[in-house]
Image (spheres, rainbow, N blue to C red):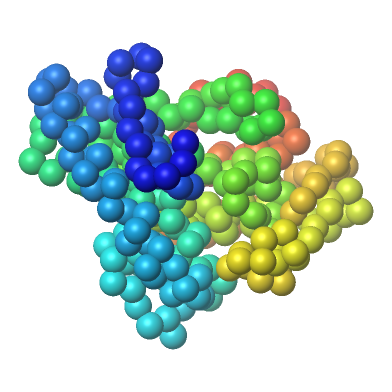
Amino acid sequence: MSGGPARRLLPDGRRLHLQHGPIDLVIEAWGERAEIAAAYEQAWRRFATVLPELVVELPLLRLPADDAHPGLDGPVARRMLAACRAHRGDFLTAMAAVAGAVADEVLAAMLAGRRLARAYVNNGGDIALHLAPGERLDIGLVADVTRPALTGSAGVRSDWPVRGVATSGWRGRSFSLGIADAATVLARDAAAADAAVTLVANAVDVDHPAITRRPASALDPASDLGWRLVTTGVAALPPALVAAALDRGAALAETMRAQRLIFGAVLALQGRLRVIGDVAPRLALAARAG
């Protein structure tokens, strides 16, 4: 699709697809039919305004999200900056939380005044969740995006402090400094999960000739990562190095969990998994975790 914002109901008759430029959302809600219809209309109205708001502030969104940042005006932009500023001392720009923040904003719009049991807004794998008391949603986990079969799932319950899930990795749609095939983080909202998973995925890393990297600016002159080396290829690594890379990512995830920045995480690299926190996922590769 191209041009302005577009919407359509997917063939299953339950999910709403919204698309505008690089933003591509899949939305689903559970509740009374009239409530769902009203929620979808509210999501659409807010969605149509999101991209123009972000474009206006794009130069500021690409600045480091540190204390020297001059601040942002739009509600989505402010969500992005706040999520990234929680990780002071680490290099992030507000763009690290853009997908999650958009999902949070559209979810908030669709919930306003509505009575829904459950709902989600999925922005390319960064997901904002709504769960009424007593409800639960199962989140699918994919360890290898080149073979998008479910590795397993994690059931998110309403009594958990989790309303956002985000996934990152070197094969994803955004650049990564690390080598994780996939890193998934659960946090209080999607923007927080998005910012955190960027850093966790970057931390899953080692040095080895099997890993190729290039400056981000050589691949995309507009990248906010500039000259920083991003991963472009990862061949088979010795098992000890796979374990070492997962150890580094897990250590950062544990630190974030202790700081209550995330609830848990699942890291995947070359068929090996590492689970952090009380996520209790039902994992097809559990026997190979390590």
Task: Work out which residue is located at the far top of the displayed protein and give it.
Answer: 12
Front-lying residue, 186 or 64? 64
Residue 186: % across, % down: 43, 44
Q: How many marks?
A: 0
Residue 231: name its quadrant. bottom right
Task: Work out which residue is located at the far left of the displayed protein and give it.
Answer: 113
Q: Please give the name of the residue rendered at 60% of the width and 51% of the height, measured from the top-left corner.
A: 174
Q: Please give the name of the residue rendered at 19% of the width and 35% of the height, measured from the top-left corner.
A: 41
Q: Is residue 196 left or right of residue 245?
A: left
> Compared with residue 56, is residue 188 higher up or lower down, i.e. above or below?
above
> Compared with residue 208, is residue 136 higher up or lower down, i.e. above or below?
above
Residue 216: % across, % down: 70, 63
Front-lying residue, 10 or 3? 3
Q: Please give the name of the residue rendered at 61% of the width and 66% of the height, measured from the top-left corner.
A: 222
Look at the image and tell me whether residue 46 can be seen: yes
Front-lying residue, 246 or 39? 39
Task: Work out which residue is located at the far bottom of the displayed protein and give it.
Answer: 68
